[in-house]
Amino acid sequence: MESTMDRRSFLKGSVLAGAVASTGMLLGGCAPKKESESAVEKNGKSAGDGGAVDWLGAPQTIDEGDIAETLECDVLVIGGGLSGLCALNAAVEEGANAILIEKHSCSRYGGIFHSAIGYEKQVEAGVTLDPEEVLNNELVKYGPLCDTSFWATWAHESGAIMDWLLEKAEANGVVIGMPFTQYPEGVDPSKEPYITIPGSFTTGWDHFIEEGKEREKYLLDALTSEAVKSGAQVKYNTPGLYLEQTDNGAVGGAVAQAEDGSYLRIKAAKGVIVCTGDFAGNEDMCTALLPETIAKDMYDCNAYTSYMESDEQPKGRLDTGDGHKMCIWAGGVMEDNPVATMGWPSVAEAGLLPYMGVNSIGERVANEAKGVLVPVGIAYDQPCAAEKGAHFWKIVDANYAQQTADMKPICMFGVMESGLDEETMSKSPNVKADTIEELASEMEVDPEVLKASIDRYNEMVAQGFDSDFAKPSRYLYPIETAPFYAIRAQQSFIHTMSGVLCSPDLEVCGSNGAIPGLYAAGNVVGRRFGNHYEASLPGMSNAFAIVHGYLAGKHCAARR
C-alpha cells in the first residue's frame, strides 16, 4: 500500500515550501516589535508585582575547562516527551543526524487524547469533518489571543501527521483506538452546545486496557524505538542547561549535564528544538505569571497528576520551565497574553454531567451543558472565587440517576449512560440534605440565594426553555424531590499552556524576528489557546505537540 505521506504528497507540499510561513508573519508570529526593554528584562518580571519575583534568573556559567565532552549533530532536541520524540523522528526522516536529551530517567507523557482531522481511521469509520467548519468553531472560543496560523495548519495537516504517528505506533505493536464515532440518536450536532466530535480524536485507552500498559508511555516507547532504529541518539538523565549562539545570534547547540555529572557540549549544525514541557512545576514562575492561581489556592489542587502517575515515569509536577528560560536567555519573548492553564474538576463527573450548577455563593452562572471545562473556568473567574474558593456545585435531586439515563450526555468517552453513584454523591465534600435550606447550610452558602437560584431554574424547566443561559431543553429537569445533593468540584491546575512567541514554522521569535536555528514545540510554544483551554476537541494540547513537533523537526532538518 502506498504510504500515507506519499499519498498526500505531504512533505513536498506547502509545509516545507513555507507557504504558511509567508502569511503567518501577518498573524503575529515573529513580526518585529518595538520594545524599551530587552527580552530578558521584559520576561523576567511578573505582570503584577513590578518584578519582585525573579523567575528567570541567569543561565549557569560553565567554565570551558569543565566541559568534558563535545558531541556533534545536525539537530539537537531538548526534551523527550511527545513533541520532542515527534521532532526527533521527523528530523531523522529528513536525513538529519539527530540527538535528543531528556533530564529525567525516561520519556514522560501528559495525556491520552490526540485530535486530528482527516486521518485514515477517521475516514474508514465514516466520519467526515470539514476543516474550515471545525476551525471556525474553535477560533470563536479563543478569539484574537491565539495564533490562527497554528490552528489553520493543524486543521489541514493533522490528518496526514496522525497517520504518520499511527504507522509508527502500529509498527511497534501499539494499538490506538477511537472511543466513539457516531452521535447518539436524536442529537442534532448543529444545535448541540455540549459536544465532543465523534471520531475527531484517538486515545490510548484501548491499548492500556487490553495490554495493561502504563497509559501513554507505550506510545513514547514506540517513537523512541523508531528514532533509534533510524540512527538517532537518545540520552536520559541529561538536562539541557543553556543554548549556545554564534556571533550573529544563531543558535548552534547547547551545554548539558551528563548522567555522571560532567558537562558536555552538543553542537547542532542546523539548530536546536526545545520541547521541555510547561512550567507548572516552577512555583516562582507560577507566582509571577499566574498570581490568581496561587491566590485561589489552586496550585496544589491537581486532579490529574495522580491519574497519570505510574511506576514507569517520574512522579509529580516536574516540568519547571527550563525550555522557556533557555529560549528567553537566547533572545526569545514570552507571549503577552493572559497565561492559559489546563484545568479539570476534582470530581470529573461533576463537570461532565449537565446538571444545574452554581458558583461558590450559590448563583447559577453558566450553561452547564457546554462541556467539562467551561463551568470550571467560569467558576474560577467569578469574583467570589478569591474569597470563597474556585469551585462549583452541581445540584440534583433524588431522581438524578434516571435523569442522566434520559439525557445521555456526550463526553470524551462516548455517551454517559449513568451518573454518579450514591456513595460518591454522599461522600465529603459532596453533601446531601432533605431540604434546600439544609443543603445550603452544608454548602456554606446563603439559603436564600441558593433557593432563589433553584426556584428560577425550576421556572425555566416548567416553561420548557432556559432563557438565562440557553441550555438545551433535553437537559432541563426540575429539582424538587428530596433528598437533594450538591456535588462539589474544585478547579484544579494541571498544566500551563503559555510559552514563547513562535513563527508558523515553529522558529522562536525575538524582538526583531526569528532567532536562526532555534525552534520550539509542545507547551513551550505560546499563543495556541489564548487565555483558556477548552476540551470540545479532546487532546488539543497533545495534538499541537504532535503537529508542531513534526513540523519543527522537518523545518530544522531542512535548514541550510
Image (tube, rainbow, N blue to C red):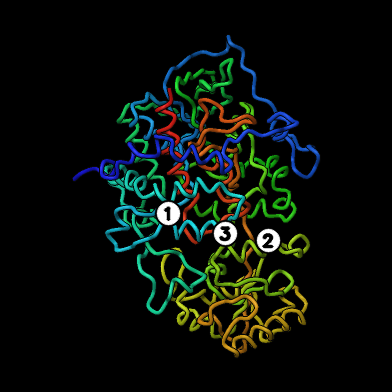
Q: Which mark is residue 461?
A: none
User: Please, what secondary structure does the residue beneath circle 3 have?
Assistant: helix
Residue 436 rendering spot, x and y as whole percentages: 69, 84
For image coordinates 30% across by 31% down, the residue present is 229
Q: Earlier in the sequence, mark 2 or mark 1?
A: 1
Residue 508 rendering spot, x and y as whole percentages: 56, 33
Mark nearer the viewer, 2 or 1 = 1
User: Please, what secondary structure does the residue beneath circle 2 have?
Assistant: helix
Q: Nearer the viewer, residue 90 or 214?
A: 90
Q: Is residue 400 above or below residue 414?
A: below
Q: Which mark is residue 380?
A: 2
- The image quadrant of residue 287 is top right
Q: Is residue 555 above or below residue 243?
A: below
In whole angstroms, how far apart are the C-alphas of marks 3 and 2? 17 Å
Q: Is residue 9 above or below residue 461?
A: above
Instruction: Please indicate whether residue 560 sits to the left or right of residue 119 in the image.
Output: right
Q: Nearer the viewer, residue 329 or 107?
A: 329
For image coordinates 51% across by 17% down, the residue present is 265
Check whether the beta carbons of the residues at disc 3 and disc 2 lie within 8 A of each other.
no
Mark nearer the viewer, 3 or 2 = 3
- The image quadrant of residue 243 is top right
Q: Earlier in the sequence, mark 3 or mark 1?
A: 1
Crowdedness near tag 1: few (<14), some (14–19) or many (≥20) residues, C-alpha within 10 Å: many
Residue 381 rendering spot, x and y as whole percentages: 70, 61
Residue identified by numbered label 1: 115
Q: Is residue 524 visible?
A: no
Q: Which mark is residue 141?
A: 3
Of the residues shown, which amino acid type is indicated by label 1?
Ser
Q: Earlier in the sequence, mark 3 or mark 2?
A: 3
